[in-house]
Amino acid sequence: MRSAGVIMNDLADQSFDRQVSRTKIRPLASGELSRRHAFSLLGVLLLIAASLMLALPPLVAWLSPIALLLAALYPFFKRWIHIPQAMLGIAFGWGTIMAWAAVREQVDAAAWLLFGATAAWAVAYDTIYAIQDQEDDRRIGVKSAALYFGSFLHWGVGLALSTMLALLTAVGWLTQLQWPYYLILLGVGLFLGTQVGRLQQPITPPLAFAMFRAHVWVGIAILVGLLAGTLP
């Protein structure tokens, strides 16, 4: 579904991508692949994803159309709202709801908090990612949180990251995770604080991409914390 979402995004943004220096070499934008190729691969990926529903509880199958709808709608939100990253966060966060339902066969309060944390996190890191395209986005009229926040960029990203950390703390409390989880979460919070501080200064596109990629390690740290927090 992640790959399918990328294809849907590239199909929707083909004309925009041709006008952005970073994305004009994408297969559809450059003409290397045709839209027929893209739709064919999209169909295969969606078929594979749908077949996985056969091995999962019925609740997951009921939730899956929402996942497809969110993935399909996200590309168009950059035309409609000033913070399209919020829609991206909701689309990514829905995976936590489906995963929880697959394991528990129900969706508990902690799952919704985790969903919210995932959505807030995506708003933060994708806003940092969008710094790379600010000038092109402004020129062609694409909306993004990086443009919307402007000189208050560090406040916007900081609020999203604070929301993420608060919700993850609540998840730990509800699921009775042990102290290693909170210790790692504290370390993550300190690291993210340095990123927010750096956003108070002008950020070059290469630095923005490096800051974005650092969130891979944020995710790994949170995963380690979750696992460590379940130890007796």
Image (cartoon, rainbow, N blue to C red):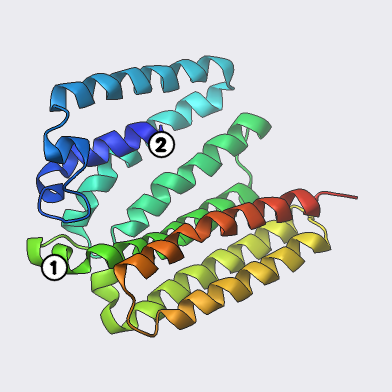
Q: Position of residue 180 (x, y in %)?
A: 80, 61
> Which quadrant would the N terminus be assigned to in this image?
top left
Q: Residue at x 28, y 22 (%)?
A: 41
| Residue 69 can be seen, yes or no | no
Residue type at mark 2? Arg
* Left or right: 105 as drawn, with respect to 160: right
48 above or below 26? above
User: Foreground residue, 223 or 78?
Assistant: 223
Q: Position of residue 10 (x, y in %)?
A: 22, 40
Q: Residue at x 51, y 54 (%)?
A: 118
* Left or right: 232 as drawn, with respect to 105: right
Q: Which residue is mark 1?
A: 138
Which label was assigned to residue 2? 2
- For label 1, the crowd category at 10 Å Cα-Cα, with few meaning under 14, some 14 to 19 and many 20 or more, is few
Looking at the rendered structure, the secondary structure element under dot 1 is helix
Q: Position of residue 222 (x, y in %)?
A: 65, 56
Q: Quadrant of residue 146?
A: bottom left
Q: Residue at x 55, y 72 (%)?
A: 192
* Left or right: 189 as drawn, with respect to 85: right
